[in-house]
Amino acid sequence: MPLAVFSVDLLSDNLLLLASALVFIAVLITKVGVKLGAPSLLLFLLLGMAVGADGLGLRFEDYETAESIGHFAMTVILFSGGFETVLKETKPVMKRGIMLSTVGIFFTALLTGFFIYFATGRIIAGTGVSIMACLLVAAVMSSTDSTSVFSVLNGKRLRLRSNLAPLLELESGSNDPVAYILTILLVKFMTEPSLQGLNPGVSIVAGIVVVLFQVVVGVAVGFGVGFGAKWLLSKIRLENNSLMGILILSTGFFANGLASVLHGQGLLSIYIAAVIISNKATIARKKEIEKFFDGITWIMQLAMFLILGLLARPSSMLPVMFPAILTGLFLIFVARPVSVFLTLAPFKGIKFKEKLFVSWVGLKGAGPILFALYPVVHEVHGASEIFNVVFVVSLMSLILQGMTLTPVAKWLNLSYPEDPEVESYGMELPEEMGLLSDHIVTPDDISAGKTLREMHLPHGIRVMMVKRQGKFLVPHGSMELAVGDHLIIVMGDSDD
């Protein structure tokens, strides 16, 4: 029975009051996540469940609205993730990432689908389910969720060796669209009478053709809009960074919309367009625009996870809990590792422990839960069970994998020691001027003298600012330094 102490509809006259309270609490609980080592997104999801219909009684049952909000949020998140992608770091792992996001998806979906059909399908449905329905469940869960991967890797400031971070970000950014295509395709085969009587062989061929068409169109539109935006940005200069960020983001929305009109994959288009714009266009004050995108992304992530959590009904998950846990364990410990090892087998120079770590970063999250809404909205038979199974598996993944990424990376010796976050005081330098860094004064630094002039800094290093006890000081040669002072320095070429 629900534990609701009150019952109120989220979409009511009190929307702003309820939304503001939820957002306020969600932001505060991120502090708890830091201490527990739990992803903030997991806490947002749990918060939504806690205040939902089976918790405090906040009702939200509009699946179509949730899907629309979630899809919009995912476009923003994918654009932001693509915009932060550094192409020169991604190029060495481009082929591996594309193989993981395509071939790896098919392997994962097939293995998981057949496991559900032979092992857990009968438990879920009582009388058994069709192979098509099992493959649909598997397709929904087949991708690594870009929202979770981007958030966990960046939130934990995990510095990975062997170009693993660019590989994982590329895979997660490009395989969500592939999983979504498979989901839509399987739903159509299950709901449209004209397609249900097709020969299995014809269905498979038709499905492959549709997937290839949507991917090709999505890629073409992404490249076209990306390079078109590059030309446009070379002609436009806006002094307001926020307006510039909105202008750039609008080009991503255009890529997504145009691809959809042409029956291509819009999520793939917006990601590719963002990568090209970020790496090929000349953008003034790019770091500040990235911070602007980071703020919007957090709002989108928070809203999406809260809404998906509100949709969840723990009481309705109990009947499918056992088969869902079995499916999740198979997906995490068998299907994902097998697909990764098979997909990366043709590539030389990849160590066993690197493949093992890539296998472990098969994070689920908002993406699979969002894709699971598609069968619900289109009234697929058994869609509610699909949603519940996917929700349980996503929670398992966020807990088992999301909370252990850092320990596993350290255990496999695949992460560098964590560096303290550099304090830039809001300043940004062009790359050609050098690197901006933060240095804390030690007793050794002032052993020869306490003034800045007596520190005898190496050639090419200049102190731009000093921060002492919360105050900012303009440096000069006769300034006396103290242990613990923060120096913001520029490291670059010098003509003296």
Image (spheres, rainbow, N blue to C red):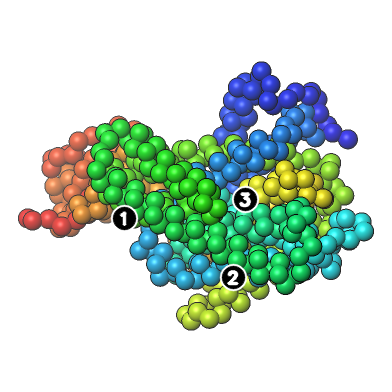
In this rendering, position of residue 475 left or right of residue 62: left
Instruction: Give the residue displayed 52% in from the left and 47% down from the top.
Output: 261
Front-most of residues 376 and 27: 376
**Which comes before the other along the chain, label 3 or label 2?**
2
Task: Please name the residue that numbered disc 3 is placed on.
Answer: 367
Q: Mark 3 and mark 2: span between their CA atoms?
A: 19 Å
Marks 1 and 3 sit apart, C-alpha to C-alpha, by: 28 Å
Q: Residue furthest front?
A: 194
| Label 2 crowd bin: few (<14), some (14–19), many (20+), radius 10 Å | some
Q: Which residue is mark 1?
A: 280
Give me the residue at 84% from left, 33% from top. Answer: 2
Task: Depth check: give the residue in front, 195 or 412.
Answer: 195
Q: Quadrant of residue 294?
A: top left
Residue that carries the numbered disc 2 in the rendered image: 103
Residue 208, by quadrant, is: bottom right
The spot of residue 203 in percent (x, y) is 71, 66
Q: Residue at x 77, y 45 (%)?
A: 379
What SS does tag 2 mark?
Answer: helix
In this view of the protein, can residue 329 be seen by the observer?
Answer: no
Within 10 angstroms of label 3, few (less than 14), some, or many (20 or more) residues? many
Give SS at disc 3. helix
| 194 with respect to 444 (left or right) | right
Q: Amino acid at mark 2?
A: Val
